[in-house]
Image (cartoon, grey):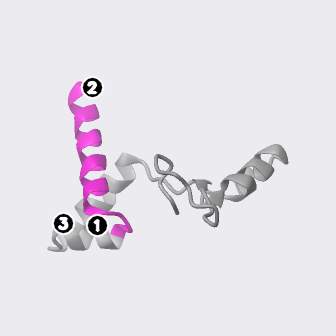
Amino acid sequence: MVPQHQPVPEDAVVHSARGLCAGCWSWAEYHGRLDEFPKLQRTAASVVEEHEFLAAQGLGPDEIATRLGMRRTSMERALYRHRAREHAA
C-alpha cells in the first residue's frame, strides 16, 4: 500500500478502502456489492472494550495494540476519542 499523499509508483496498487484497490472498490460500488467487503476500521467503543479486557489480564500497551492488530498510536487515538466523547456528553 502506498500512502495517498505521496507520488504513486507506476507498478503500485493504490489501496482505496475495505482492503480493495481503487479499481476493485469502484467496481464493487457500481455493482452494489460493497457489503461483501467489510469495513476494516473499528469503532472507538470496541477498541475501549477490548483494551479494558486485555489490560485487566495484565498486558502492556504495546502487547494490547499487537493483539488488537493496531499500531499503538492508533489504539491510543481511539481511546482518546472515546474518552473525549464521554466527557462531552
Report how far apart the C-alphas of labels 3 and 2 lie in the structure: 27 Å
Q: Which residue is mark 1?
A: 65
Density class for disc 1 (Cα within 10 Å; few <14, some 14-19, many ≥20) is many
Region rendered in magenta: 68-89
Q: Position of residue 55 (x, y in %)?
A: 19, 66
Quickly name the residue at label 3.
Answer: 61
The kind of residue tagged 1 is Ala
Instruction: From the viewer's perspective, tell me whether residue 79 is left or right of residue 2.
Output: left
Task: Characterize the local packing of mark 2: few (<14), some (14-19) or many (20 or more) Cα atoms within 10 angstroms.
Answer: few
- Choose mark 2 or mark 1, whichever is in front: 1
Instruction: Confirm whether residue 17 shows in the render.
Output: no
Q: Nearer the viewer, residue 63 or 49?
A: 63
Is 8 magenta? The answer is: no
Mark 3 or mark 2, which is nearer to you?
3
Which circle marks residue 89 in the picture? Answer: 2
Near-viewer residue (74 or 12): 12
Relative vertical location of residue 60 with respect to residue 44 in this rendering, above or below: below
3D distance between C-alphas at marks 1 and 3: 6 Å
Q: Name the dominant secondary structure of the magenta segment.
A: helix
Q: Is residue 88 magenta?
A: yes
Disc nearer the start of the sequence (3/2) = 3
The kind of residue on which mark 2 rests is Ala
Looking at marks 2 and 1 on the same chain, the residue that comes earlier in the sequence is marked by: 1
- Which image quadrant: the C terminus? top left
Q: Is residue 28 left or right of residue 53?
A: right
The x, y position of residue 86, in whole percent, is 25, 34
| Element class at badge 2 | loop
Disc 3 is placed on an element classified as helix
- Horizontal side of residue 50 vs 36, given as left or right: left
